[in-house]
Image (cartoon, rainbow, N blue to C red):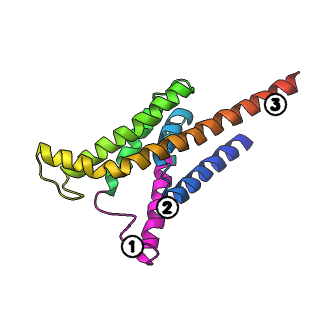
Amino acid sequence: MKQNKTIITTFILLIVIGSLCRVTGFAPQIAMAVFAGAIIKDKKWAFAVPLFSMLISDLLFEVMNRTGIVHNMPGFYAGQWMNYLLISGVTLIGFMINRINVTNVAIASLTAPVAYFLLSNFGTWAMGGGYARPKTFAGLTQAMMDGVPFFGASLYNTVAFSILLFGGYVFIQRSADNKVQKAVA
């Protein structure tokens, strides 16, 4: 029972911290999705943690927009469902991490924001969102270029939060293993 309580508390902390970070401009949801996919055994929860974090931060954005704290940053808009779908897809990248090590985490932490960038900009272009670029190859190229200013921050945030999440996980796991070894000795 105590372990379940610890897991639930950890999930809630991840969701709340991720939501607050996103509202302040540091978006950890891609890293959270990769982490959840790699670490959380129950696949429902692996999808739920980053999605709940996005939902809470979108609610906060919506409240801040409606109260005038921020302007032109609504939490919910016509194409927002695509972000939820893409975060779910990024969780699948986490499922592919068989062993937690620097190489696997680095590859996933670089692959996930690239996949998110390409798919989100393609989806925005295909659905006529954003700047409603023409449905030509040149229009697609323009749509991809529209997202470049956001890509650097997405890559940086994903790598930084992956280091924090996976590094913290490994640290806690090793600390627990050391306590068990000391107790046995």
Looking at the image, residue 131 sits to the left or right of residue 36; the answer is left
Question: Would you say the residues marked 1 and 2 are in contact, meaning their CB atoms lie under 8 Å apart?
Answer: no
Query: Is residue 55 depicted above or below 122 in this figure?
Result: below
- Between the C-alphas of marks 1 and 2, the distance is 13 Å
Q: Amino acid at mark 1?
A: His
Q: Residue at x 40, y 34 (%)?
A: 111
> Is 136 situated above or below 38?
below
Say which label, 1 or 2, has the lower sequence index.
Answer: 2
Secondary structure at badge 3 equals: helix
Amino acid identity at mark 2: Val
Residue 71, numbered label: 1
The quarter in which the N terminus is drawn is top right
Which residue is at 41% across, 38% downward?
Answer: 112
Helix, strand or loop status at disc 1: loop
Residue on which disc 2 sits: 23
Mark 3 surroundings: few (<14), some (14-19) or many (≥20) residues within 10 A: few
Residue 169 in the image, given as x and y percentages of width and height: 64, 36
Is residue 42 or residue 109 the one in the foreground? 109
Q: Nearer the viewer, mark 1 or mark 3?
A: 1
- Report crowding for label 2: few under 14, some 14 to 19, many 20 or more residues within 10 A (C-alpha): some
Residue 53 in magenta stretch:
yes
Q: Please give the label number shown on residue 179.
A: 3
